[in-house]
Amino acid sequence: MKVSLISVGLLVGMTGVGCGGLDGADAVEVSASLDATSESTQGLSTQVTGSSQVTFIAMSGNETKPYDQSATSVVAYTRDSSNGTFTAYPGTGSADGTISVPNVPSGRMYLKLGSRYLVSTGRTFDLGSTAWGRDGTFVSQPTQMTVSATGMSPWQPEDYLDVYSLNAGAFGYAGSIATGRPLTGATSLSGLSFDYARMANPVLLDSSRGDLLSLAQMRFRTSANGVPYRAMHKVLLSSVTQVEGQPNSISGTFTQPAATGTFSVDWRRSAFEALRTQVNPAAVSTYNEIWMSSRPAALSSAGASISGPPLLVKLNPDSQRTDIVTGSMTYNNPLPAAWQKVATATAGFTKSYALGTATPYTMNVDIRVEQEESAFTAAPVEPLVGPVVAPLVNTRGAFQNLTGVGADASLRWSKPSVGTATNYVVNIYRLGTSNGSTTASRVAVIHTDLQSVHLPPDVLRAGGTYFAEIQSWYQPGSNLATSPFKRSLPRGRASVLTGMFSP
């Protein structure tokens, strides 16, 4: 089964390097201290159950399959608030997508699924997800693709090429990884070549299953108010069947879609920038971007409604943090008219972490807003929720570097100063070194509707150095602590990065 880049591949709680994150229920009013009553057990034992059904949304038809949980480590932990002791209740995962843990006492628990923990008083969990594209296989070996085509509009240095397949759910960019890119003024491609395995979502293409490869010219334009942007312009379609490791050559003609549209935003970039020091006092602003695209409505519940092409509009005009009113931006639209238009605004931030004299590791996070396109045009675009405030490791400020926090450390925080958080997600990273550089690996992901978590057994280990990303989520109508991969619109997210800490 294909593992979806954003949602499906996270079902078992993976360990990764780099920017972490997942994408809540009505706001939970809790204090910054832990809810001891909810953690205590009442003597009543119950069965914990869950189901992991993956729905693939494809042009050739939707399909639902179970996600195999037979290799997932499933454990329910309860915590005695009087002495801080965790008690483990082993469970099992099955190939039919179900998980089960018997005889778990009532009260709040930490349900462990691999390296993911769901902190909840619930006993039934929906672990299902939605993914763009049919169930397929990712290409992992170098698989070269060469394109020759006519019919482009005269190429501009600011143009670029999107690559995607709607049925397969594949996408990427023929940018720096490609050779033979067009020169200024060119109206054709002659030997554009790139390694398909290096696409962002390189699903193996099979024309017998209805797959078509699209190559889209994203053309540089200027809005009605003089703001530069890029928009969908012309598209090349080709039927392709790939064999992993073997090259493909395709040819054809770019054509301009008949359908057109307009998009305009009042983009309050200063409102995102105003939250920079809440991400971390040392955080550095890196980029501001708005993407607008069209997706099947069912993908509103996916891990990311916009995770890559096809984009209709991409807006990142400069490196400034000033507000922008774009005026009308036009685009051509090759996508089905009935699809839902969705827009995402992100502001990126980084913080560096270094072990000893090793080259620092740069952690990337963002503050993002995702809504229907009509909401972007109807009101100013600004954060729906801000970073949490005053984060603590145990009782000490989390922005400083800390030692001696203990293996059972707690993380605590106050509510965001902007918006209302409906849930929180905490990512724990362990730092290491490799070839003279600092590295980071995600070792735990914790979902909660409280404003604090205790770190479960074995998350922190003696001799290790860690940092945490605390995400506040605004996602009305869903609860990430019981349905961690379910999404809805509108949604927003903001991150805090702590300093380094060790047991």
Image (cartoon, rainbow, N blue to C red):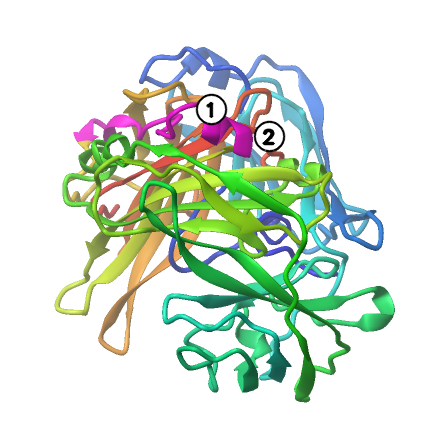
Q: Above or below — where is 327 with respect to 459? A: above
State the residue at coordinates (54%, 21%). Answer: 476
Left or right: 85 in relation to 9: left
- Image coordinates of residue 439 in percent, x first then y, are 31, 64
**Label 1 to label 2, Cα distance in Å?**
19 Å
Circle 2: element type: loop
Residue neighbourhood size for the residue with mark 2, other residues' Cα within 10 Å, grouped as few (<14), some (14–19), many (≥20):
many
In-front residue for pair 399/313: 313
Image height check: is 289 above or below 175?
above
Q: Do tag 1 and tag 2 residues touch (Cβ < 8 Å)?
A: no
Q: Dot 1, crowdedness within 10 Å: few (<14), some or many (≥20)?
A: few
What is the quadrant of the N terminus in the image?
A: bottom right
Q: Is residue 114 magenta?
A: no
* Percent position of residue 389, x then y: 25, 25
In this figure, which residue is indicated by the disc labeled 2? 488
Which residue is labeled 1 in the image?
Answer: 378
| Of residues 427 and 164, the one drawn nearer to the viewer in this rendering | 164
| Viewer-closest of 324 and 290 | 324
| Residue at the (71%, 50%) spot, across then down | 69
Left-right relation of 86 to 89: left
Which segment is the magenta one? 373-396
Looking at the image, is mark 1 or mark 2 nearer the viewer? 1
